[in-house]
Image: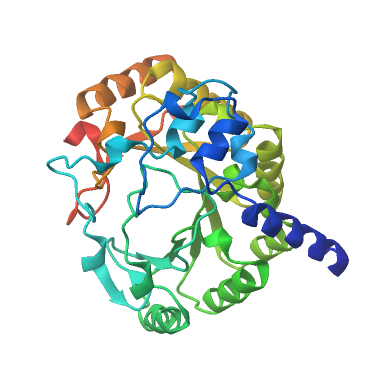
């Protein structure tokens, strides 16, 4: 355990960094030395711009095609209507059962704990999600009651938004309440914060995860090896020392990582950082993201190339989530 004074300093640091995130794409471009007219920005996107300075610091100055910049820059093409793209492509709102709980797969349930994120990735499949209807104290209490009553649920997945936006006290309370449910054996947390805001991995958070009864897995989200700098690696090493299983899920994005060499570098860099490549999701067809779609055929070719290039344990599963299916479906099955 650490001294309270150190906890206060750590908490203030990551919260201050969160508040200090870029909110203006023009300001980010200016700081990168890129002319504002070098790209066609979306003038008034309903999905607001937000990027942590820790993530922006890894972008290459002067490069409008930088793989990290492309993930966060709101472009005018987002306003184009494309057939097959919708506000809720996974039909998640139809799976709400109790408060903040989403049940899609046997034996596990997803708990929506917040609608907030540290970074707004432009390809986000929940960019139009109605968080106001599904998060909050009342929704959380209803969800925890449902989890307590259903002993067939053995794994709880914390999602959002990003669950690590909650502070350490909130997360400690939530983990304690889940730990009290003997049938819940596993806790899974999906978070981009270890990558985009590594200061979030505080000693208090590590204590909470290390002392939980449940087996804990943290699924981070990195799409490119450039995202994994020394600060991120240090945060991941601390999580691993706390006994947390580390996995990564990526999204296949045109112009970012849609070639075998780039994804192989990501997988190898992840493993060096103690993280096992888990999934590569082909793009969920949410409205405003069609320009990121690399296509299923290209994805299949990339997966085949990765199998030839990497040992099997480093090859992530290429999957698509299909509404109504009882699991994520391998791309090869589609």
Q: Position of residue 36 (x, y in %)?
A: 48, 30
Work out whether 124 lies above or below 189. Answer: above
- Residue furthest to the left: 83
Q: Is residue 263 left or right of residue 236?
A: left
**In the foreground, 198 or 263:** 198
Q: Position of residue 168 (x, y in %)?
A: 66, 67
Q: Position of residue 136 (x, y in %)?
A: 45, 77
**In the foreground, 159 or 19:** 19
Q: Residue at x 33, y 27 (%)?
A: 254
Q: Quadrant of residue 30?
A: top right
Q: Residue at x 40, y 27 (%)?
A: 39
Q: Note whether residue 311 is visible.
A: no
Q: Quadrant of residue 270?
A: top right
The C terminus appears in which quarter of the rendering? top left
**In the foreground, 59 or 298:** 59
Q: Is residue 245 left or right of residue 234?
A: left
Q: Quadrant of residue 177?
A: bottom right
Q: Is residue 88 left or right of residue 185?
A: left
Q: Note whether residue 279 is visible.
A: yes
**In the foreground, 310 or 94:** 94
Q: Residue at x 35, y 40 (%)?
A: 42
Q: Position of residue 238 (x, y in %)?
A: 71, 47
């Amino acid at each position: 355990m650490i001294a309270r004074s150190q906890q206060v300093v750590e908490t203030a640091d990551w919260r201050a960094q969160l508040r200090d995130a870029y909110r203006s794409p023009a300001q980010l471009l200016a700081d990168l030395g890129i002319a504002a007219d070098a790209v066609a920005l979306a003038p008034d996107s309903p999905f607001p711009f937000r990027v942590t300075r820790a993530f922006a610091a890894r972008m290459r100055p002067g490069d409008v095609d930088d793989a990290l910049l492309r993930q966060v820059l709101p472009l005018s093409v987002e306003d184009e209507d494309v057939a097959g793209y919708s506000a809720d492509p996974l039909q998640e709102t139809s799976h709400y059962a109790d408060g903040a709980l989403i049940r899609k797969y046997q034996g596990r349930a997803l708990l929506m704990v917040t609608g907030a994120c540290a970074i707004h990735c432009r390809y986000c499949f929940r960019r139009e999600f109605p968080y106001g209807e599904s998060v909050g104290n009342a929704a959380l209490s209803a969800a925890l009651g449902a989890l307590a009553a259903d002993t067939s649920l053995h794994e709880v997945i914390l999602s959002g938004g990003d669950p690590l936006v909650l502070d350490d006290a909130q997360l400690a309370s939530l983990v304690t309440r889940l730990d009290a449910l003997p049938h819940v054996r596993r806790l899974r947390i999906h978070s981009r914060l270890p990558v985009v805001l590594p200061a979030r991995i505080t000693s208090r958070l590590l204590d909470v995860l290390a002392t939980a009864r449940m087996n804990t897995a943290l699924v981070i989200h990195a799409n490119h090896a450039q995202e994994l700098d020394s600060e991120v690696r240090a945060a991941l090493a601390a999580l691993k020392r706390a006994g947390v299983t580390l996995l990564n899920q990526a999204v296949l994005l045109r112009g970012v990582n849609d070639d075998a060499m780039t994804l192989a570098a990501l997988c190898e860099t992840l493993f060096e950082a103690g993280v096992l490549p888990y999934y590569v999701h082909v793009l969920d067809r949410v409205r405003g993201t069609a320009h990121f779609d690399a296509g299923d055929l290209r994805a299949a070719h990339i997966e085949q190339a990765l199998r030839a290039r990497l040992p099997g344990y480093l090859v992530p599963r290429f999957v698509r989530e299909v509404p109504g299916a009882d699991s994520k479906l391998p791309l090869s099955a589609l």
